[in-house]
Structure formats: structure tokens, C-alpha cells
């Protein structure tokens, strides 16, 4: 469960520069922050379109090769997108939108067939196993829903978070992930989902049934992801609402940057995405649980935090977007704190890199979560500890820049661990 932690800043500062100079630098920092956001969301859109092409190829000619290509495109699409998550918590326009494209965890039985061990409808979610792909009509709170045509509009307006249940995730990266990989039934053993390509075959080759509707759902979800990313990329372009909002008030804009860094570092990534799953030893708490791509998602979340502080982002084509940064602002006021912040970001990335390297070399994140696996626990907690530690330095940055309080997302896994098991 998420909580909220508030960091308070002092107003009495010893600055070696004038307020006017700092204010001018803030404008430059915010402009570069918006430029990096535009680049990240544009890269996310480019890779989503590549995924869209791969999905269309899979649907047109289902085979192991086209399914593998779609999976590879999905994994590549996560690299730039995860680096955008640092923009979420400080920018309301992103936070209000983000659930369309990256909500998790999801009750996958809403979408498609699941193993019998999954269970049935529950009081918390009557649609837990609605299996919309197999059922062209179903009921929500006693009302019959026509699902005969699975379109982007149907997914976005009717099915996503149906019955006001957050676990009814019907759109975005993770719905697509499930449709490509299927359930991961390996527990804390190595191995991702193993959906067969015949789930998209036509005629007698369609072993799993309802292949036409599964293809319709996958196409609709992917098309919707592209259109959602088109929207957000436009918000950060010149004249876009997100850019205009963050640059309109320099103090509020810098506060937004630090709120995003702190909330993602602490409550969201260290807490909800890493520490909680380790406490529960539950692979269902993995961010990319169907594909076993969680180690990469964690790594690129951390990278996103670092490149916002440093004011630099390397695009998917290898070009760099860089300019005035928070680091520049902090170093003018307190060079030691800037060095500390940089060092802690480096330490976090080293820890997340070690976890990523282990997973890339065969030690799956699922296995790291196994109860009693001391090596896995050490790798995950290395990342958790780094993220928590860098949040403390973010608190000091808030203070040294003379900002008012910022509210940082918390997590019971960090703030009240005993409550996790209640």
C-alpha cells in the first residue's frame, strides 16, 4: 500500500549567487527538462510504431518467428518508455494519463484464458475471469455489455478499469505483454510466459480458440498505445500543454522535477515495485511479470531519474539531448551536495546494473524473489537501498534550492512493513 512522505525545506540559505541568476538558470533547466521529455515520449512513440508493425505482421502470418519479433519489439519499446516515468509524479497531465499505458498489476483473466489455478470471480473483482476474448457479451454490475467488436474505443471507454476496479487493466503495455507471452506459470523458477503462436492462427490451426478475437484485441490495444503516445509526445512539443505548464512557473517547475525524482525513487520503485515483491516472495508483483523483463524496467526507471538530474538523455538513434540541469543549479549553491547526488545516482545505477546483468546472464528476476535466495535478495535490496539513499539526497536538494515542501510517494513496504502481512 502506498503512503505519502513529506519533505520540508528550510528557507534560510547561504547562497553565493544572486536570486536573479538562479531564476534565469531555472528557466534554462525547465526548457531542457521539457526537451528531454519530448525526446523520450517521441522515442516511445517510434518504438511503439515498430511494435505495431510487428503485431500486424504476426496477425497477418502467425508463426514462431513473427511472434518472437513482436516480443522483441515490445521489449525494445520499454527502454525509452521506462525512462519517462520520472515525469509522472510531478506533472499532473502525465500522472492522470499514465494509467492508460502502464497500469499494473492486472487481472489477466479479464482479457483471455488463464490456467485453472487462477481461480474465479471474487468479491473484489467479479470480472476476474470474464475472458472478453472468448465472450462477445458479458455483464458489468447487472448490465449486459456488447463486446462483439473489440476496438480501441471499446477497450479505453468500456473495459479499462471496468466496474471501477483498478486491476481490470485492459489497455497499455502490460495488456499487450500478456497477449504476446501469456501467463508465466513458473513461479519463482526461471521462465517467462509461453503463449503459442497458434493462438493467432486461423481456421483449424487455431488450437486455443477465438484466435480472430485475440488478434482483434491485440491490434486494438497496440493501436491505442500508439495513439496515447502520440498524445503525450505532443504535450511536450512546442505549444504543448505539459511544456507550457512546467515552464510557466519556475519554482513550481523545479518542484515538479524533484517530486518526480523522489516519488519514483522511493515509494514507487524502491517500495511498490521492488521491496514489496521481495517481502511477499511473489513474482506476481513483478512489473513485467509475463515477459520476465522486470530487471530492464527497473534499470531504465533508475536511468530516467539519473538523466533528469544530469539534464542529458541519449535517444534511440544515438543522438544526445542535453542542456542546463538540476546538477548545474545545485552545484552553484553547494558543490558538495551536487557531488553527493551524482555519486548516489551512480551507486544506484551500479546496483541496478548488477541486478540487470545477473538476469541477462540467466539468473531470472523470478528466481531472485524466491524465499531464502540470499543472492537474489542482495541484488534486489542493493537497488532498493540505493534508491532510498538517493531520495535522502533529493530531500537535501529541495532544502538547498529553497523550495517549499514536496510530497513524495511512500510505500508500506518501506514505511510500515508489518502492515504488509496484515
Image (cartoon, rainbow, N blue to C red):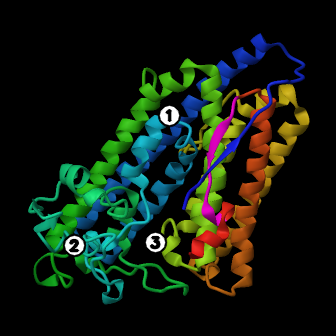
Q: Earlier in the sequence, mark 1 or mark 3?
A: 1
Q: Secondary structure at mark 1?
A: helix
Task: Count residues near mark 1 (Cα–Cα under 10 Å), then give few for <14, some for 14-19, many for 20+.
Answer: many
* Pointer 1 residue: 38
Q: Is residue 65 above or below residue 145?
A: below
Q: Residues within 10 Å of mark 3 (few under 14, many from 20)?
A: many
- What is the quadrant of the N terminus in the image? bottom right
> Which mark is first along the chain, 3 or 2?
2
Residue 269 horizontal/vertical position (percent): 61, 58
Q: Which residues are magenta?
A: 404-413
Q: CA distance from mark 2 to mark 3?
A: 23 Å
Residue 46 in the image: state x and y as whole percent: 41, 45
Q: Give the percent coordinates (x, y) of residue 318.
A: 59, 44
Which mark is drawn over residue 291? Answer: 3
Tell us which disc is closer to us: 2 or 3. 2
Residue in front for this viewpoint, 179 or 206? 179
Q: Is residue 150 above or below residue 393?
A: below
Mark 2 residue element: loop
> Element at badge 3?
loop
Give the residue displayed 64% in from the left and 31% down from the top.
255
Residue 271 appears left or right of 52:
right
Q: Is residue 319 above or below residue 221?
A: above
Q: Nearer the viewer, residue 9 or 237?
A: 9
Look at the image and tell me whether residue 304 can be seen. no
Q: Nearer the viewer, residue 145 or 293?
A: 145
Task: Answer with left or right where residue 300 lies relative to residue 53.
Answer: right
**Quadrant of the rendering where the C terminus is positioned:** bottom right
Label annotation for residue 130? 2
Task: Please tell me which of labels 2 and 1 falls first in the chain.
Answer: 1
Amino acid at each position: 500500500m502506498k503512503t505519502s512522505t513529506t519533505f520540508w525545506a528550510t528557507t534560510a540559505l547561504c547562497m553565493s549567487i544572486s536570486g536573479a541568476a538562479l531564476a534565469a538558470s531555472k528557466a534554462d533547466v525547465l526548457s531542457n527538462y521539457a526537451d528531454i521529455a519530448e525526446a523520450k515520449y517521441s522515442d516511445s512513440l517510434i518504438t511503439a510504431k515498430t511494435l505495431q508493425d510487428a503485431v500486424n505482421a504476426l496477425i497477418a502470418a502467425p508463426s514462431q518467428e513473427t511472434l518472437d519479433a513482436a516480443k522483441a519489439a515490445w521489449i525494445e519499446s520499454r527502454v525509452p518508455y521506462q525512462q519517462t516515468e520520472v515525469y509522472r509524479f510531478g506533472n499532473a497531465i502525465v500522472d492522470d494519463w499514465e494509467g492508460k499505458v502502464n497500469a499494473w498489476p492486472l487481472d489477466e483473466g479479464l482479457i483471455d484464458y488463464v490456467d485453472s489455478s487462477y481461480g474465479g470471480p471474487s468479491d473484489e473483482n467479479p470480472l476476474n475471469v470474464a475472458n472478453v476474448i472468448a465472450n462477445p457479451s458479458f455483464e458489468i454490475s447487472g448490465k449486459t455489455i456488447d463486446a462483439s467488436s473489440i476496438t480501441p474505443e471499446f477497450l479505453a471507454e468500456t473495459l479499462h478499469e471496468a466496474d471501477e476496479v483498478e486491476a481490470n487493466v485492459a489497455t497499455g503495455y502490460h495488456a499487450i505483454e500478456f497477449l504476446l507471452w501469456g501467463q508465466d506459470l513458473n513461479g519463482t523458477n526461471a521462465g517467462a510466459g509461453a503463449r503459442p503462436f497458434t493462438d493467432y492462427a486461423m481456421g483449424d490451426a487455431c488450437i486455443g480458440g477465438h484466435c480472430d478475437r485475440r488478434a482483434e484485441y491485440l491490434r486494438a490495444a497496440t493501436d491505442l498505445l500508439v495513439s496515447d503516445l502520440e498524445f503525450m509526445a505532443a504535450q511536450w512539443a512546442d505549444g504543448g500543454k505539459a511544456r507550457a505548464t512546467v515552464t510557466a512557473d519556475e519554482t513550481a517547475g523545479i518542484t515538479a522535477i524533484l517530486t518526480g525524482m523522489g516519488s519514483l525513487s522511493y515509494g514507487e520503485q524502491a517500495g511498490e515495485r521492488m521491496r514489496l515483491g521481495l517481502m511477499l516472495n511473489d513474482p506476481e508483483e513483478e512489473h513485467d511479470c509475463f515477459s520476465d523483463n522486470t530487471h530492464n524496467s527497473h534499470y531504465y526507471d533508475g536511468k530516467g531519474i539519473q538523466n533528469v538530474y544530469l539534464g542529458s538523455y541519449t535517444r534511440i538513434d544515438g543522438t544526445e539531448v542535453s542542456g542546463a540541469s538540476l546538477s548545474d543549479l545545485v552545484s552553484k549553491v553547494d558543490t558538495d551536495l551536487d557531488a553527493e547526488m551524482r555519486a548516489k545516482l551512480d551507486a544506484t545505477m551500479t546496483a541496478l546494473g548488477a541486478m540487470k546483468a545477473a538476469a541477462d546472464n540467466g539468473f531470472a528476476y523470478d528466481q531472485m524473489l524466491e524465499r531464502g535466495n540470499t543472492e537474489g535478495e542482495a541484488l534486489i535490496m542493493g537497488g532498493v537501498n540505493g534508491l532510498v539513499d538517493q531520495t535522502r539526497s533529493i530531500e537535501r536538494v529541495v532544502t538547498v534550492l529553497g523550495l517549499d515542501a514536496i510530497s513524495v510517494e511512500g510505500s508500506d513496504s518501506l514505511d510500515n512493513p508489518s502492515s504488509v502481512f496484515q
